[in-house]
Amino acid sequence: MNQLNNFTKGIIKENPVLVLVLGTCPTLATSTSVINALGMGAAATIVLLCSNMVISALRKVIPDKVRIPCYIVLIAGFVTMVQMLVKAYLPALDQSLGIYLPLIVVNCIILGRAEMFANKNGVLSSAIDALGMGVGFTLALCLMATIREVFGSGTFCGMELPVLIDNHISILTMAPGGFLVFGLLIAAMNKFAKHKPKKKDFGCAGCPQAASCTKASCDEVTEEAADND
């Protein structure tokens, strides 16, 4: 159950894009099409998984004073391997992602999980955490890309959609449209995914001066506090 919670937290409760607001630059830049979003999400997930596992395995060997440079070197090595594979087998995707593929090295999600989780937990837990965060990142990218491509370009995965192809909203494929969709999705996540705060108890039991209180104006204070809440 703990490992399941470790996996699912990255999808909703601690989604790296919509809750922690990390990786905003590649999110906005590569979410103009679903194919690009899938490619970026898959690449980041592979790098995140490999780096988390290796950093977790070496966490007792890496000196604490130089841990961040060591993390960056390891992450850069995995990014280079992923980039070479994409160039060799998916040249069109490599051209579409452009500079944002090698920039995975400085992605806050990957370095953040290395420092906050992999550095303190075992290899299995770190791998599951990486998968959860990677899936959450990919889903958020694909959701944004679907909205922006369908309504901004009138296509889905490059396929033209009837009606929408002639009535698309071009601004959604631009930077202002990306920020608009990004903000709306964050607002929706805050509205529906997070737990609502508990209401404060204004009764006498919660008052620190209940023992010495004459209770002369308790009713007025309670009504006023309830109205303000």
Image (spheres, rainbow, N blue to C red):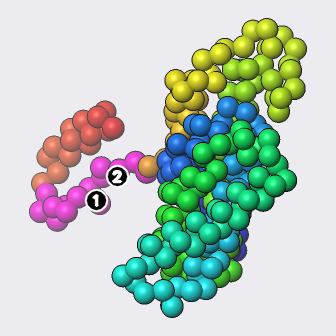
Judge from the rendering whether residue 213 lies leftward or rightward of residue 67; answer left or right.
Answer: left
Check disc 2 and give the amino acid type. Asp
- Figure disc tally: 2
In the rendered image, residue 212, in percent from the top left (x then y), is placed at 12, 63
In the rendered image, residue 171, in percent from the top left (x then y), is placed at 60, 17
Q: Secondary structure at mark 1?
A: helix
Q: Nearer the viewer, residue 3 or 38?
A: 38
Judge from the rendering whether residue 213 lies leftward or rightward of residue 182; answer left or right.
Answer: left
Q: What stretch of residues is rendered in magenta?
A: 198-213
Q: Nearer the viewer, residue 2 or 211?
A: 2
Instruction: Label the magenta part by its dominant secondary structure.
Output: loop
Q: Quick check: is 24 in the magenta stretch?
A: no
Residue assigned mark 2: 201
Residue, x 51% and y 81% (percent of image)?
Answer: 120
Judge from the rendering whether residue 133 lies leftward or rightward of residue 168; answer left or right.
Answer: left
Q: Which mark is residue 206?
A: 1
Residue, x 79% and y 14% (percent of image)?
Answer: 164
